Image: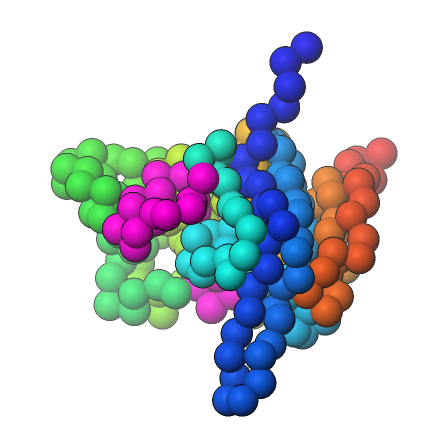
Amino acid sequence: MSEISEIAKLEGVSKHYRMGDTDVTALDRVSLSIAAGEMVAIMGASGSGKSTTLNILGTLDRPSEGRYLVDGESTDGLDDEALASLRNRKIGFVFQSFNLLPRETATANVELPMMYAGVRPKLRRERALRALARVGLETRSHHLPNQLSGGQQQRVAIARAIVNEPRLLLADEPTGALDSTTSNDVMRLLTELNGEGMTVVLVTHAMEVASFATRIVTFKDGAIVMDVANRPREFLEAS
């Protein structure tokens, strides 16, 4: 049997910040491996290190010490342009606040990552429409964000995150701005994407959101204090 490949791997990663006259350690020698096909929830109180971890996983921040590998590729020594290229090819992002351009249609918002990747306009449009169909918004492609509900806006954001078919999908409190019913709908969509083979890592403070994951990693004071397998909520509900 072939070994499961690691999509993301932190090796002894620390992150230090300078705040005034004080040195702050946000992460303290964290090692974490995420295998292909996992759905991992990262939990912890405010200031525990979970958001810093997500930023490093997304190459939006760099470790002060240690090493980070994406899909087997070390990020050591990569300049900002190389990191941006790596992000665009292999990582998708979903944010709590959706981060949609308010004056652009759903389709145009989904096209954005492909513009940065230099995809020609006709192919951009085709792929954007496919991604919107995948999240159930094929009839809302010409709508502006303010013409969509919060749940629909988050689905547009997910379509944008997956349009380049990333190896790793990162979600930062993806249901934080949604009601419980809409939150469940979004989590089921992320679960479906994971079931199709996409690796998903999400930061959440809510156990009901983390319960959809196959693994829960808990941070405290910049370190991992618990890392356990989880029987996903969708499976439990189907039993």
- Relative to 12, residue 24 above or below: below
Name above or below for residue 218 compared with residue 147: above
Measured as percent of width and height from the top left, residue 30 is found at 66, 53
Task: Answer whether residue 215 is magenta in the image.
Answer: no
Which is more toward the observer, 27 or 110? 27
In the image, 37: left or right of 17?
A: right
**Residue, x 27% and y 58% (percent of image)?**
105
Q: Specify the farthest residue to the top.
A: 1
Picture layout, residue 10 above or below residue 2: below
- Residue 230 location (% of width, % of height): 80, 42
Query: In this view of the protein, which residue sits in the foreground, 126 or 81?
Result: 81
In percent of width and height, residue 10 lies at 59, 46
Q: Residue at x 78, y 36 (%)?
A: 235
Here the colouring is rainbow
Residue closer to the observer: 59 or 137:
59
Question: 86 or 234, which lies in front?
Answer: 86
Magenta segment boundaries in residue numbering = 74-98
Q: Residue at x 67, y 74 (%)?
A: 46
Residue 20: tell me if it is visible.
yes
The answer to whether any part of residue 167 appears in the image is no
Left or right of 112 in this view: 201? right
Image quadrant assignment for residue 35: top right
Q: Is residue 199 left or right of residue 140?
A: right
Q: Is residue 85 magenta?
A: yes
**Where's residue 73, x and y in %?**
44, 35
Q: Residue at x 50, y 89 (%)?
A: 20
